[in-house]
Image: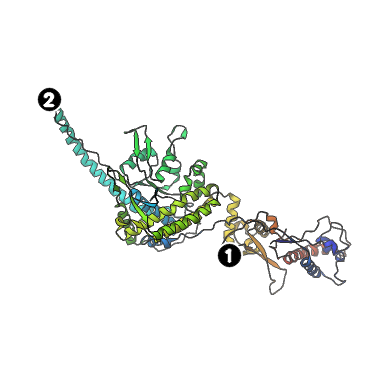
C-alpha cells in the first residue's frame, strides 16, 4: 500500500526556529543543533536526514481504487479472415501505406452487402441474424483512408456501372416496345369503336427494373423505391459519411421526421413504410429493407455528427469503428497484384449470385443458416462473457455493447459465406462451423475494444489529447524517461526543463507513473531519477485520490530564522544548491512509495 513518512525536524534540531524548515538548517552554521559534530559539512546533513527519514514513522493509507486503464490500440486481427480476403487486406494495406483496418472494415461491409437479404443465421427459435453491417473508418486527412475505401469499393462500383449500362440498353429497347404498344392500342381503340367488339387491349410492356447494389443518395424517400425494386438490399457508400448523418429529416417539417427510425429498421432488415409527397405510388411498403453502410469521416466531424439524438436512438451504437493511430507516411514500391483484385471481384460475384428462397405465396425470404453444435458452444461462451461485461458499463458504451453482442454473429455469417464463396460453393453453405463463429467473435472483440478506445478519444478535450500523446511518446521510449529526455523530446516541452519536470510531476500525481531513483554516474554528482509508467503496456491507472500517490516528508514552512553568517552572500548561494541536493536525497530516501516531489 502507498505510505507516507512524517519527519519532524524539530525533534532532532533543538535550535530550529519555531516553524523552521530545511532552509533554516542549511543557513545556520551549526545546522540548528543537528547531532552532526563540529566538523560536519553539507553532505553530512543530507546523509543524516536520509537516515532520519528511514527511521520516521510510517502512516499507512488505503490503496486507492484504480479505474480501468485507457484502451490502447490493438492491430486488426487479419489472421482470422478467410483467404483470399486475408492476403488481399495485408497486401492492400502495405501498398497504400495505411492501417489494415482501413481495408478490412470496408471489405467486411461490402461482403455483407453482397449477401444482403439472401441469408440469415438462426441463433435460436425466433432469433435470426442478417448479414447487415454498418462501418465507419475514422481518421484525419492524410491518413490514406480514402484510397483504401476506394480500392475496396472498386469491384462493387464496376458491377454497378455494368448493371446501369445494361439498364440503359434495356430502356432503349423498352422505348421501341412502347411505340409498338401505343400503335397497337390506337388500333385496338379504333377497332372497338367500329365493330363494337370487346377484344382484350394490348398489354403494356413493363418498364425494366434497374439492378442496384450501391447507392450514395441518403434520403429515405429516394431509397424506398430502389429498395423495393432490389429486395436483396443495398450498400450505402460515401467517402465522407457526414453527408449521411447530416441528411436525416432534411426535408421534414421542422427537421423532425422518421429518417432515423427507418434506418434503424434497415439495420435489422425489417419492413418500412414510406409516405412520399412526390412520385407514384405515394406510399411504398418494403417488406425486408436491408441496408449495409460504409464510409469515412474525420474524428471531429464524427463527434459533432453523433449528437445526443443519435446516441440516444442507438444509431451510434450500431456503427463498427476503426480509428487507428496516425502513422507517418512512407514511400513504398509495393503494389497490389491485379490477380488478387480479380479474386476479390470474383468472390463478390459469387456472393451476389446467392438467391433467397420463395414461400408458397411467392414471397422472397432469406435462406436459413444454422449452427453446428461446436459453433453454438463458441457462441454461448461469448454470449456469457459479453453480457457479464455489459453489466459493468453505462451510457454510450453500454449501448454499443448491446449491439456488439449480435455483431459477432453477423460477422461470423459474413466470414462463413465468404469462405464458401472462395471455394465456389456458397449456395450450399447451410451450417455455420466453429471456425467461422470463432472468427466472428474475435472480430467483435476487436470492435468492442476499438469502441472503448474511439469513444474515449472522441470525448477528449485539448488537455486530455495532449496527455494521451505524451503518454504515447513515453511508451515509445520504453515507458521510462527523465526530465532531460522530455526536455529534448516532443516540441511542446523542448528546451523547457522546468516545464518538463512539472509535467512529469503532474503525471505522477494523476497516477500514470512513479519516480524511480537513478544511481549517480561514474563521475559522481547528485542523485537523479526517472519517470516510469505504471505499465508500459496497460496504460495509465488513475487513483481516486491522486495526492496519496506522493511520498511526503512535510515540515512547517515559515520565514527563515536570522543567522549570523561569515559570508552571507556566498553561504546563501551554497545553501540553495545544497537544499536542492538534500531535497533529492530526502525524497529518494522515502522512495518505498512512489517517490515524488510535493
Q: For residue 81, which quarter of the picture?
A: bottom left
Residue labelled with disc 2:
196
Image quadrant holding the C terminus, namely bottom right
Neighbours of disc 1 within 10 Å: few (<14), some (14-19), many (20+): few
Depth check, front residue: 496 or 306: 306
Residue 283 position within the rendered picture, expressed as x and y whole percent measured from the top left: 35, 34
Number of marks drawn: 2
518 over 121 or under it: above or below: below
Q: Which color scheme does this rendered protein use? A: rainbow
Residue 406 position within the rendered picture, expressed as x and y whole percent measured from the top left: 44, 51
Label pair 2/1, CB-CB below 8 angstroms? no
Depth check, front residue: 340 or 491: 340
61 over 520 or under it: above or below: above
Residue 138 position within the rendered picture, expressed as x and y whole percent measured from the top left: 47, 51
Image quadrant holding the N terminus, namely bottom right
Residue 577 position within the rendered picture, expressed as x and y whole percent measured from the top left: 77, 64
Neighbours of disc 2 within 10 Å: few (<14), some (14-19), many (20+): few
Q: For residue 18, which quarter of the picture?
A: bottom right
Q: Is residue 357 left or right of residue 218?
A: left
Q: Earlier in the sequence, mark 2 or mark 1?
A: 2
**What residue do we see at 51% from left, 46% from top?**
303
Front: mark 2 or 1: 2
Q: Is residue 179 left or right of residue 538?
A: left
- Identify the mark at residue 477; answer none if there is no mark: 1
Amino acid at each position: 500500500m502507498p505510505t507516507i513518512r512524517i519527519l519532524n525536524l524539530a525533534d532532532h534540531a533543538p535550535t530550529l526556529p519555531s516553524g523552521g524548515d530545511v532552509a533554516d538548517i542549511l543557513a545556520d552554521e551549526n545546522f540548528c543543533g543537528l547531532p552532526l559534530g563540529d566538523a560536519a559539512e553539507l553532505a553530512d546533513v543530507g546523509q543524516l536526514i536520509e537516515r532520519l527519514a528511514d527511521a520516521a514513522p510510517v502512516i499507512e493509507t488505503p490503496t486507492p481504487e484504480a479505474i480501468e486503464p485507457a484502451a490502447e490500440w490493438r492491430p486488426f486481427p487479419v489472421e482470422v479472415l478467410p483467404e483470399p480476403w486475408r492476403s488481399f487486406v495485408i497486401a492492400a494495406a502495405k501498398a497504400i501505406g495505411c492501417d489494415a483496418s482501413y481495408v478490412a472494415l470496408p471489405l467486411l461491409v461490402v461482403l455483407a452487402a453482397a449477401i444482403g437479404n439472401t441469408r440469415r443465421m438462426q441463433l435460436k427459435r425466433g432469433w435470426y441474424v442478417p448479414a447487415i453491417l454498418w462501418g465507419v473508418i475514422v481518421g484525419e486527412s492524410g491518413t490514406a483512408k480514402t484510397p483504401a475505401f476506394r480500392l475496396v469499393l472498386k469491384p462493387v462500383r464496376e458491377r454497378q456501372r455494368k448493371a446501369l449500362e445494361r439498364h440503359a440498353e434495356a430502356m432503349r429497347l423498352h422505348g421501341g416496345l412502347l411505340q409498338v404498344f401505343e400503335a397497337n392500342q390506337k388500333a385496338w381503340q379504333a377497332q372497338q369503336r367500329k365493330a363494337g367488339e370487346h377484344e382484350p387491349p394490348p398489354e403494356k410492356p413493363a418498364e425494366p427494373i434497374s439492378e442496384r447494389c450501391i447507392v450514395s443518395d441518403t434520403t429515405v424517400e429516394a431509397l424506398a423505391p430502389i429498395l423495393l425494386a432490389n429486395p436483396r438490399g443495398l450498400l450505402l457508400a460515401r467517402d465522407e459519411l457526414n453527408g449521411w448523418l447530416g441528411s436525416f429529416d432534411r426535408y421534414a417539417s421542422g427537421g423532425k421526421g422518421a429518417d432515423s427510425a427507418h434506418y434503424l429498421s434497415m439495420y435489422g432488415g425489417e419492413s418500412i413504410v414510406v409516405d412520399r409527397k412526390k412520385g407514384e405510388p405515394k406510399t411504398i411498403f418494403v417488406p425486408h429493407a436491408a441496408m449495409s453502410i460504409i464510409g469515412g469521416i474525420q474524428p471531429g466531424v464524427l463527434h459533432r455528427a453523433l449528437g445526443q439524438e443519435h446516441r440516444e436512438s442507438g444509431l451510434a451504437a450500431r456503427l463498427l469503428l476503426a480509428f487507428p493511430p496516425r502513422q507517418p507516411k512512407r514511400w513504398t514500391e509495393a503494389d497490389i497484384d491485379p490477380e488478387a483484385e480479380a479474386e476479390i471481384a470474383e468472390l463478390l460475384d459469387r456472393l451476389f449470385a446467392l438467391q433467397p428462397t420463395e414461400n408458397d405465396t411467392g414471397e422472397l425470404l432469406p435462406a436459413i443458416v444454422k449452427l453446428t453444435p461446436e459453433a453454438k458452444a463458441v457462441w454461448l461462451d461469448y454470449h456469457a462473457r459479453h453480457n457479464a461485461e455489459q453489466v459493468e458499463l453505462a451510457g454510450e458504451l453500454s449501448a454499443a455493447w448491446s449491439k456488439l453482442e449480435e455483431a459477432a454473429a453477423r460477422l461470423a455469417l459474413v466470414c462463413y459465406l465468404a469462405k464458401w464463396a472462395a471455394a465456389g460453393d456458397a449456395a450450399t453453405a447451410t451450417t455455420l462451423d466453429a471456425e467461422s463463429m470463432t472468427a466472428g467473435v474475435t472480430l467483435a472483440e476487436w470492435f468492442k475494444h476499438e469502441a472503448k478506445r474511439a469513444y474515449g478519444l472522441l470525448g477528449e478535450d485539448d488537455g486530455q489529447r495532449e496527455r494521451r500523446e505524451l503518454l504515447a511518446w513515453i511508451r515509445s521510449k520504453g515507458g521510462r524517461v527523465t526530465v532531460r529526455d522530455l526536455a529534448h523530446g516532443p516540441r511542446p516541452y523542448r528546451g523547457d526543463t522546468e516545464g518538463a519536470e512539472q509535467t512529469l510531476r503532474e503525471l505522477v500525481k494523476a497516477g500514470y507513473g512513479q519516480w524511480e531513483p537513478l544511481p549517480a554516474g561514474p563521475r559522481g554528482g547528485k542523485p537523479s531519477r526517472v519517470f516510469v509508467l505504471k505499465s508500459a503496456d496497460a496504460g495509465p491507472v488513475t487513483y481516486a485520490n491522486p495526492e496519496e500517490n506522493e511520498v511526503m516528508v512535510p515540515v512547517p514552512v515559515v520565514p527563515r530564522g536570522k543567522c549570523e553568517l561569515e559570508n552571507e552572500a556566498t553561504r546563501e548561494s551554497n545553501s540553495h544548491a545544497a537544499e536542492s541536493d538534500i531535497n533529492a536525497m530526502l525524497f529518494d530516501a522515502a522512495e518505498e512509495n512512489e517517490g515524488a516531489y510535493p
